[in-house]
Image (cartoon, rainbow, N blue to C red):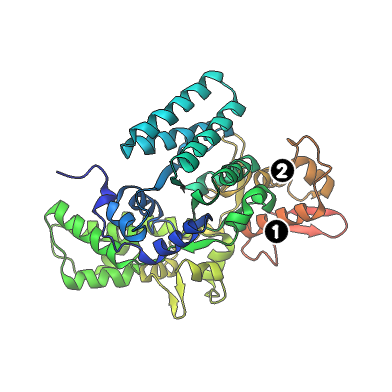
């Protein structure tokens, strides 16, 4: 009989380096950011933490019974109001207790949740969530760790309200409360500093990069596919797959599946994989997760000093870590890099070719870029930028020149191939900013 959760099958040795770093942050009452390329297994690692008892026993040998993980999939609340996010946090907290068969704790939290919903008041809901953390962390002595999975999908709409709430929860529970954010790149690179100001003491700089290759994870996935299909791949094929993929988990999976789907023997594996749409899709997802600057560095082979590409393991001292990716780059699989930015009024999104880039922009970045795309060639004064970007704020008096500069800096890094020498978002000295298609 198959287990309810797939992650329970993983070895206790899975992702030892990254898990050890997570444990070190949790023990000191800090939060952290789990950063990695698309397809390296961030969601899988969260699932392992929640459902794999052997992993918890290994990394929390003396405290595994009081460490409680709460999985929150933020893709389910993207484009939802903050009140729905608070409800979802509350709901996930209750669900996690029920799944762990902590009946007394579950009934108490469920009662608080239903009472708060009856008031239909956001303030009451937030307060009762704080009461729930008080009960679990202070009265029951549990260490509560929220796992914010796929948080990068929520980043475009994140507000300071969330970080203020997290700060309040941490202040109450002290060292018994942590949050782990799953992201494609650190929060410091993607959102305005003022948004996470209230929680920055517990999260800034606490970045754990998920390595491209984890031997226990790869070995398990290959063995599991062999068991599932009743087919085997040879040791030579296994070795070649690892070489061509760099051990990237999703690429390994689709390559093994491609081999097992072939009724006839396969000759040259590199050419075979390059012809498969599933492999191409996995490679494109990696490419689309990069900024134009990072893409340009890869095209021009000027990636030796790109810290992000080195941290996530896509490049090494000798070059690209994934030969299949390098070959696709040379063959022009990622031609969309040359596409223009376009604002689609019907869907209210900004696209580059077929890729929706507005999904990776914060509210402030989206408002500014949308306006600039609607007014190409027009010099936009800083006062106008402040009005466009911070129009929903009660007052714009507190918006500084530095805040505008930081916004322009971040936006350039998201749309320009060379942010320090921008072609599109240009500053006109003494006047303002101009967008050139």
Q: Is residue 398 left or right of residue 284?
A: right
Q: Residues within 10 Å of mark 1 (few under 14, many from 20)?
A: some
Disc 2 to disc 1, C-alpha distance: 17 Å
Q: Tell me the residue at 69%/50% (across/down).
A: 194
Q: Is residue 264 left or right of residue 155?
A: left
Q: Position of residue 45 (x, y in %)?
A: 37, 55
Vertically, is 321 above or below 375?
below
Q: Tell me the residue at 65%/43% (across/down).
A: 160
Q: Position of residue 248 (x, y in %)?
A: 35, 63
Residue nearer the viewer, 267 or 25: 25
Q: Position of residue 113 (x, y in %)?
A: 48, 27
Q: Position of residue 86 (x, y in %)?
A: 53, 34
- Point out the residue furthest to the front here: 139
Q: Which mark is residue 371?
A: 2
Vertically, is 420 above or below 66?
below
The quarter of the picture where the N terminus appears is: top left
What residue does disc 1 label? 409
The quarter of the picture where the C terminus appears is: bottom right
- Point out the residue furthest to the top here: 118
Q: Is residue 267 left or right of residue 338?
A: left
Q: Tell me the residue at 32%/37% (across/down).
A: 99
Residue nearer the viewer, 301 or 339: 301
């Amino acid at each position: 009989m198959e287990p309810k959760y797939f992650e329970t099958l993983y070895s206790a040795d899975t992702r030892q380096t990254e898990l050890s770093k997570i444990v070190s942050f949790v023990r000191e009452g800090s939060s952290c950011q789990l950063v990695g390329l698309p397809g390296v297994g961030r969601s899988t690692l969260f699932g392992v933490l929640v459902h794999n008892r052997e992993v918890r026993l290994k990394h929390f040998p003396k405290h595994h019974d009081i460490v409680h993980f709460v999985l929150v999939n933020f893709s389910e609340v993207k484009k939802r109001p903050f009140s729905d996010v608070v409800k979802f946090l509350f709901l996930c907290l209750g669900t996690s207790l029920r799944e762990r068969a902590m009946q007394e704790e579950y009934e108490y939290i469920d009662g608080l949740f239903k009472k708060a919903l009856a008031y239909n008041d956001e303030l009451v809901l937030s307060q009762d969530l704080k009461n729930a953390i008080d009960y679990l962390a202070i009265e029951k002595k549990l260490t509560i760790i929220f796992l914010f999975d796929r948080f990068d999908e929520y980043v475009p709409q994140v507000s300071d309200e969330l970080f203020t709430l997290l700060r309040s929860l941490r202040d109450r529970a002290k060292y018994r409360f942590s949050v782990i954010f799953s992201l494609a790149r650190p929060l410091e690179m993607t959102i305005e500093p003022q948004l996470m100001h209230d929680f920055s003491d517990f999260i800034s700089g606490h970045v754990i990069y998920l390595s491209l290759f984890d031997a226990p994870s790869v070995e398990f996935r290959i063995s599991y596919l062999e068991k599932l299909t009743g087919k085997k791949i040879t040791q030579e094929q296994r070795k070649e797959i690892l070489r061509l993929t760099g051990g990237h988990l999703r690429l390994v999976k689709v390559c093994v599946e491609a081999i097992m789907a072939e009724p006839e023997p396969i000759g040259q594996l590199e050419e075979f994989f390059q012809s498969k749409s599933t492999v191409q899709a996995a490679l494109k997802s990696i490419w689309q997760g990069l900024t134009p600057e990072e893409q340009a560095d890869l095209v021009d082979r000027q990636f030796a000093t790109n810290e992000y590409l080195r941290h996530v393991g896509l490049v090494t001292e000798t070059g690209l870590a994934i030969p299949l990716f390098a070959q696709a780059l040379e063959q022009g699989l990622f031609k969309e890099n040359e596409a223009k930015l376009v604002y689609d009024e019907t869907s209210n999104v900004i696209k580059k070719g077929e890729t929706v880039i507005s999904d990776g922009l914060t509210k402030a970045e989206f408002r500014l870029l949308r306006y600039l795309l609607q007014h190409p060639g027009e010099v936009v004064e800083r006062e106008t930028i402040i009005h466009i970007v911070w129009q929903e704020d009660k007052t714009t008096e507190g918006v500084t020149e530095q805040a505008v500069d930081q916004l322009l800096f971040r936006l350039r890094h998201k749309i320009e191939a060379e942010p320090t020498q921008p072609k599109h978002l240009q500053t006109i000295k003494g006047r303002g900013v101009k967008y050139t298609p």
